[in-house]
Image: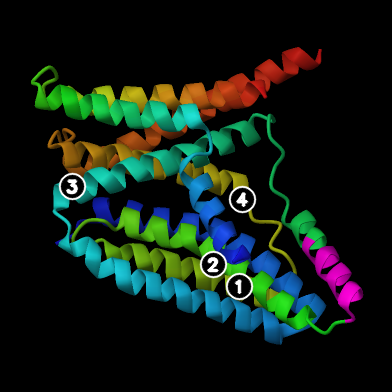
């Protein structure tokens, strides 16, 4: 039986990480839909979702065949590197060393690029191009979602809660997008990325220790402590970066 | 073909956003594994060594990123 202390961070990590990725994919699919109509946008997105589903159906059962400790170590190390990458970027953005991701600007850039393509070839292959753009956006952002779901769910009984978190994020973002019919620029993407970076890093350290045969004292509850530790470290580092940049600007 | 190239680039970026951060994190995992096997580290200490090494990797990644 999976306890709440184990399932809640898994659902939360999959939900928040998927929200960030789905928002980015939605912006590009919306841009294709606005410039070329909904048909190529929807077809491209469906084709990418089919590829991603096939990947999950192929690799999901394979994970069950790998010895648990080896799998936890491998997934833990990958999760660690992936989570640290997100946390580092979020810290640099929060500290002002990197520009924040702007969905409105991304939407404007994508629509402009698609309109230029339409003007260049008279619209003959523009539908195809729009479909490929939507396909690529959903495939690339979806790859990260699939990795996160497989990684945080890499323990017996946890794949379903992870998939549930990701599915909830997809439904929420699509519902919000359909109501607003505009890029979801109000979503605090960097704050979400910050939290996910901390969650994935915490999970990565926890899985690695389990895989090495050196479990944390406190069992699954240690995940909460680890996530809090890396979030606090990230916040401290962001404050240091902000202070350093302020001093340099004076 | 362009989708495949973009996919490979995305996967590359997922795991190697900053080379030093990736190297320090993976080296910490390797050191813990070797230390544990060789009975240099006790299983009780390994979680804390790993957590500290990962925190160090984050500090290095942020410091390098802020300098750019």
The residue under the point 18% across, 42% down is A211
- The chain letter under disc 4 is A
The answer for how far apart the CA atoms under marks 4 and 3 are is 33 Å
Residue receiving disc 1 = A135
Is disc 2 in the same subunit as disc 4? yes
Residue A158 percent across, percent down from the top left: 25, 61
Same chain check for tags 4 and 3: yes
Q: Which residue is labeled 3 in the image?
A: A70
| Name of the residue lying farthest toward the bottom | A39
Q: Quadrant of the C terminus of chain B?
A: top right
Mark closer to the observer (4, 1): 1
* Residue A199, percent from left and from top: 40, 44
Q: Is residue A162 above or below residue B38?
A: below
CA–CA distance between discs 2 and 1?
A: 6 Å
Q: Which residue is mark 2?
A: A139
Front label number (2 vs 4): 2
Q: Residue at x 24, y 69 (%)?
A: A61
- Asked if the magenta segment contains residue A117, the reply would be yes
Position of A43 relative to B57 (above/below): below
Which label is found at residue A83? none
Labelled pair 2, 1 in contact (Cβ < 8 Å) = yes
Q: Residues within 10 Å of mark 2 (few under 14, many from 20)?
A: many
Residue identifier under label 4: A189
Looking at the rendering, the stretch of residues picked out in magenta corresponds to A110-122
């Amino acid at each position: 039986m999976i306890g709440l202390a184990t399932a809640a961070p898994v659902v939360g990590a999959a939900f928040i990480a998927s929200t960030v990725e789905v928002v980015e994919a939605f912006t590009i699919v919306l841009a294709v839909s606005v410039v070329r109509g909904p048909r190529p946008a929807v077809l491209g997105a469906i084709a990418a979702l089919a590829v991603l589903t096939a990947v999950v159906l192929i690799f999901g059962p394979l994970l069950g065949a790998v010895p648990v400790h080896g799998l936890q170590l491998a997934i833990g190390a990958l999760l660690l590197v992936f989570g640290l990458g997100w946390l580092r970027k979020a810290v640099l953005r929060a500290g002002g060393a990197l520009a924040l991701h702007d969905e409105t600007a991304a939407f404007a850039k994508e629509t402009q690029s698609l309109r230029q393509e339409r003007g260049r070839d008279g619209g003959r292959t523009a539908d195809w191009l729009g479909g490929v753009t939507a396909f690529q956006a959903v495939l690339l952002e979806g790859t990260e979602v699939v990795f996160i779901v497989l990684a945080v769910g890499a323990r017996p009984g946890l794949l379903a809660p992870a998939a549930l978190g990701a599915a909830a994020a997809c439904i929420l973002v699509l519902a919000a997008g359909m109501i607003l019919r505009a890029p979801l620029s109000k979503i605090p993407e960097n704050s979400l990325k910050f939290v996910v970076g901390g969650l994935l890093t915490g999970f990565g350290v926890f899985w690695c220790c389990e895989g090495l045969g050196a479990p944390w004292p406190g069992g699954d509850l240690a995940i909460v402590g680890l996530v809090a530790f890396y979030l606090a470290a990230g916040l401290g580092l962001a404050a240091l970066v902000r202070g350093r940049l302020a001093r340099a600007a004076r | 073909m362009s989708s495949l190239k973009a996919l490979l680039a995305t996967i590359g970026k997922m795991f190697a956003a900053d080379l030093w951060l990736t190297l320090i994190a993976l080296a910490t995992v390797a050191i813990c594994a070797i230390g544990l096997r060789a009975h240099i580290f006790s299983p009780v200490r390994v979680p804390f060594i790993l957590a500290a090494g990962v925190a160090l990797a984050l500090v290095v990644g942020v410091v390098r990123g802020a300098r750019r």
